[in-house]
Amino acid sequence: MTTIDDVIEDVSPGPPQGTDSNAVNAAAIVIVVVMSVTALKLGRAVVLPVVISVLLTLLLSAPVRWLRRRRIPERLGAAIVVFGAIGAAIGVGSTLVTPASEWIAAAPATFAKVESKVRLAMKPIMALQQSADRMATVAAPPTPSGRAPAQVQLATPSLFQRILELLTIVPATFSVIFLTYFLLASGPLFRKKIAQVLPGRRDVLHFETILAEIELVTSRFLATATMINTGVGVATALALWAVGLPNPILWGGMVAVLNFVPYLGPITSFTVIALAALASFDTLAHALIAPACFGAVHLVENNLVTPMLLGRRLPVNTVAIFLGLIFFGWVWGIPGAVLAVPLTTVVKIACDHIPPLRHLGELLGN
């Protein structure tokens, strides 16, 4: 006999048909994201040189195209550009080797001076801390054996381990050089080869459109950021030279490199310049002039130069840049922090052209 409950159960709507498929798709996306992040972190030795080579290819592709329009073959043009960039980097590095070696040799004496001046300035606070330590020692119960608690000393990496870490940089450097040359020498051929792997003519054209936009935006950003950071380094070096801080070229080069790292780079530069000035000058007022000069240069660059030259060419917002800095810095360390802005830009452009990820692209947009 049919009851009312049976009739209600028959006519009541069941769960939506798309619920299971949506759950499966969401789970698949989560699994893919976790596996991708794990592959990026564990495969750093392989993935990072490839990423650096691709970004260098985007940066140096414009000179290669310019040489090609002058009827210079792409292989020869790529060799000229790559080895010319290496020569320029070696020339800039050679100007910094001497002051850097001098500063490293004088580092113990420099840190001793800084420590003595900091102790002198912090003497009242240290006196209060010593009083608090004495009170804590008196109030603390004695140990069962009557002896002071043992101190734990952390193990530091040996010299052999440090040499092995340095030796791993050599093959990575050569990998970046040769891969950059091959990508530049192949021109658009390699991009077309990747696009042809995708099924369908529409997907090929879509893929080429994405790559063209990524190349345009990223190359403009890298070129503009390089010019801005170089100008910041030169202005800082001139300001520190006028103040009288030793090794102004070294500090200017340091500022130019660290300025590629958003937020953390200027903070690190300010701290290092302040410590160097504190060790070089006798009075605290004189020592504060050097970091103040760098702070003025950074304020002008951050509030006037960068928004004017780079504001419209950077499609990501400041929150996205900060999140990209945290993520890529966690995945790849210092190189990831340096590459955070261009990589976040690439992710944003790719999300704009992939329909399921367009909401993420809008979230990262400027």
Image (cartoon, helix red, strand yellow):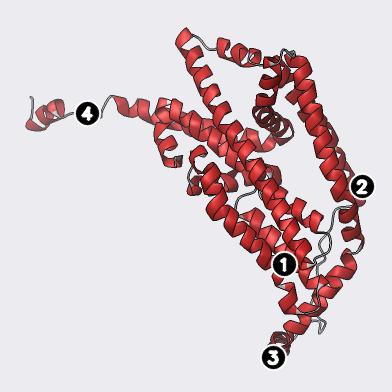
Q: Are marks 2 and 3 in contact (CB under 8 Å)?
A: no
Kind of residue sitting beneath label 1:
Ala
Residue 150 in view in this figure: no
Question: Which amino acid lies under the numbered mark 3 shown in the image of this protein?
Answer: Met
Q: Nearer the viewer, mark 4 or mark 3?
A: 3
Mark 2: few/some/many CA within 10 Å (<14, 14-19, 20+): few
| Left or right position of 152 against 131 | right
Which SS class for mark 3?
helix
Q: Earlier in the sequence, mark 2 or mark 1?
A: 2
Which residue is at a point 49% across and 14% down the rendered structure image? 205
Q: CA distance from mark 4 to mark 2?
A: 67 Å
Residue 331: percent from the left, percent from the top?
64, 42
The alpha-carbon separation of the residues under discs 2 and 3 comes to 45 Å
In primary-sequence order, the first of circles 2 and 3 is 3
Name the quarter where the N terminus is drawn: top left
Q: Secondary structure at mark 1?
A: helix
Looking at the picture, tell me which residue is in the foreground, 365 or 130. 365
In this view, the mark in front (1 or 4) = 1
Task: Answer with left or right where residue 266 lies relative to residue 212.
Answer: right
User: Nearer the N terminus, badge 4 or badge 3?
Assistant: 4
Q: Which residue is mark 4?
A: 14
- From the viewer's perspective, is the residue at label 2 or at label 3 nearer? 2
Q: Earlier in the sequence, mark 1 or mark 3?
A: 3
Q: Secondary structure at mark 2?
A: helix
Q: Pointer 1: what residue?
A: 290
Q: For the residues carrying marks 1 and 3, which lies nearer the camera in this image? A: 1
Q: Position of residue 243 (x, y in %)?
A: 76, 67
Q: Tell me if residue 227 comes above or below residue 295 in the rendering.
A: above
Identify the residue at image location x=61%, y=31%: 219
Marks 1 and 3, Cα distance to the nearest angstrom? Answer: 41 Å
